[in-house]
Image: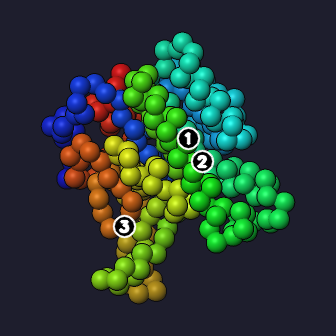
Amino acid sequence: MAINLSQLKKPDGNRPIIATLVGEAGLGKTTLASMFPNPVFIRTEDGTMSLSGRDDVSLFDLANSSNDVLDQIEALATQEHNFKTVVIDSITQLATIIEKEIVEADPKAKSINQAGGGYGAGYNTAATMHGKVREWIGALAYERGLNVIFIGHADTETMDLPDLDPYTRYTIRMHKKSLPHYIDNVDMVAHIRLKTFTRGEGDKKRAISTGEREIICFPVASSVTKNRFGVTEPIPFTLDKNPFALFCAN
């Protein structure tokens, strides 16, 4: 069923949106983010090759530390510019950078599990840093009117709930203590995926895809997804159009 986005509700006024885009490699997360109005990318990984030659997209130098990320956010907050969207590409690699810094700061730790004395202390410290990044970049939305787009790499996790049999769902590849900063207080968590069908039975069952892509951004058991715009059906996605243009500040 094709969804008519023009019939859905827009945010109050023309306020910016804060969204998290999730998906496996090569499905167009960066391309979709680049189609938001006048974007600038804060890059924690060099994943913007698909944007080569585009003069409508701006890139900060590659951030090699969490301080680099904060410095780039501060520059957007304090300097004059015409950007309308800021993209962090990716929060998954940012998590890797933050955890590496925490381990290196603790001479007794050889891994994030041992940092800060163990017992989850290292992950708590990482979550605090993610909270700082989220707070700073959120201020760009509320004080400077920038749309904020987080890009995360997809992973799977097993849900073992007390009232259901265990099942697997898609999530963002980072520790669960840091996830709420990019899931709870955002307007949308959107999962980009291939439209996939299965054929055959038993051991002969196989997945088939035509290459068509779709976006899931409403609550389903199979992924950590949501939206505040009233979307309740999958959205077709091609690499030449931003299906969320209606909702964002421009």
Q: Nearer the viewer, residue 136 or 173?
A: 136
Q: Secondary structure at mark 1?
A: helix
Mark 2 → mark 3, Cα distance in angstroms: 28 Å
Count of marks, rendered view: 3
The residue that label 1 is drawn on is: 133
The residue that label 2 is drawn on is: 129
Q: Which mark identifies residue 68?
A: none
Indicate the quadrant where residue 13 lies: top left
Tell me if label 2 and label 3 are in contact, CB under 8 Å: no
Q: Residue furthest bottom?
A: 202
Q: Is residue 202 above or below residue 38?
A: below
Q: Secondary structure at mark 3?
A: loop
Amino acid at circle 1:
Val
Point out residue 58 in the picture as x, y percentages from the top left corner: 58, 23
Counting residues from the start of the chain, the first of labels 2 and 3 encountered is 2
Point out residue 192 in the picture as x, y percentages from the top left corner: 42, 51
Question: Between tags 2 and 3, which lies in front?
Answer: 2
Horizontal arrangement in the rendering, residue 25 relative to residue 164 (left or right): right
Mark 1 → mark 2, Cα distance in angstroms: 6 Å
Task: Using the rendered image of the protein, determine whether residue 34 is visible from the camera's viewpoint.
Answer: no
Amino acid at circle 3:
Ser
Point out residue 170 in the picture as x, y percentages from the top left corner: 44, 64
Q: Nearer the viewer, residue 236 or 155?
A: 155
- Residue at 37% across / 72% down in the picture? 198
- Residue at 62% across / 34% down in the picture? 70
Amino acid at circle 2:
Met
Point out residue 137 in the picture as x, y percentages from the top left corner: 50, 34
The residue that label 3 is drawn on is: 222
Question: How many residues crowd mark 1 within 10 Å: few (<14), some (14–19), many (20+)?
Answer: some
Mark 3 → mark 1, Cα distance in angstroms: 28 Å
